[in-house]
Amino acid sequence: MERSGRGTSGRLLAFIAALAAALTAAPAGSQIRSGPGEASDPDTEARAITQIVTAAEVADWARDRGDAEAMLVASRMMAEIHNRARNGDAPFVTSSILLDEAEALAADDPYILQRIQRLRSPDKGVRSSPFGPGPIVLVRRLRARETYSFTVEARRNEVLRVAAIGDGDTNIDLTIRDSAGVVVCNDGSRDHYPVCTLNRPQPGTLRVEVVNRGGVWSRVQILTN
C-alpha cells in the first residue's frame, strides 16, 4: 500500500467498499431495542453496525501490514458513530483506541502524526452523527468454547441486525433462533466478525447465541440496533 502522505490508496478504498457490500448482504439476525426515551431508527443503526464491523476489519488489515494510514481510516470510520453502551467491559473497538494504534504504527512519520494530532483535537468529537443515537454495544468475555445468549423482541418489517467483533484470538460464531428453536440465521464463517441481518422479520422473541469456538478466552463486542 502507498504511504506517500497524499491520502488513502485506491486499493484500500476498494477493500473498504468490498467489505461494506459483503456486510450489507449478510444473513438474517436480530436486535436489542433502545431503552425508554431513546429515539432510534433501525435502518440507520443497522448501517452503523455495518460501518463498525467494516472499521474493525480495516483495522485488522492495517495491523497485518503495519499501515498507519489504513488504521487512521478505521479510526475515522468509528468516529462517525455514537454508541449506546450497556453494562460490561468498555468497548475495545473505538475511534480513540484505533487512533492510539495508528500513532504506534506511524513511528516518526510527521505527516501521519500531524493528522493524528488534528483528529485528537477536542473540536473533532462526534457532534452530529448520520447514524442517530447509534447502535447498542455490549462487551462480554467468553471462555474457550463458551456460548453467551440473550433474547430479543423482533418487530414486524423493521430491519434487525446483530454483529459480534472478537478481539482476534479466536473464531467467533453467531446464531439466531426463533421461539421454536429453529435457526433463522447462522454465521459460522470461521472469522471473528459474524453479522446477521433480517430485513422483514416476523414479530416475536428471538434468541441470540454468540459462541467462542477457540481454545482461549476472548473479548467480544456485541452490536445491536
Image: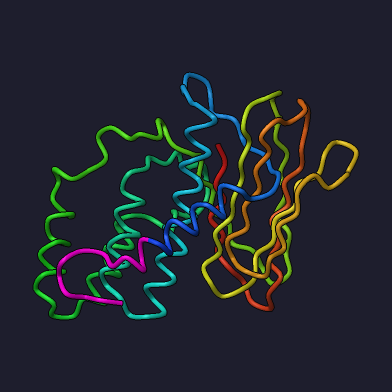
Picture quadrant of residue 58:
bottom left
Image quadrant containing the C terminus: top right
The answer to whether 108 appears left or right of 148 in the picture is left
Q: Residue at x 46, y 22 (%)?
A: 39
User: Quick check: 42 above or below 83?
Assistant: above
Picture quadrant of residue 224:
top right
Picture quadrant of residue 64:
bottom left
**Residue 189 pos. (x, y %):** 68, 65
Q: Residue at x 33, y 80 (%)?
A: 66
The answer to whether 76 appears left or right of 113 in the picture is right
The answer to whether 110 appears left or right of 127 in the picture is left
Most extreme residue toward the right is 180
User: Quick check: 56 above or below 29?
Assistant: below
Q: Nearer the viewer, residue 99 or 77?
A: 77
Q: Nearer the viewer, residue 153 or 36?
A: 153
The answer to whether 125 appears left or right of 147 in the picture is left
Query: How many numbered marks are there?
Result: 0
**Residue 132 pos. (x, y %):** 40, 30
Q: Residue at x 31, y 48 (%)?
A: 79
User: What range is drawn magenta here?
Assistant: 1-13
**Residue 105 pos. (x, y %):** 26, 77
Q: Residue at x 73, y 59 (%)?
A: 147
**Residue 34 pos. (x, y %):** 54, 29
Query: Would you say the magenta stretch is mainly helix, strand or loop?
Result: loop
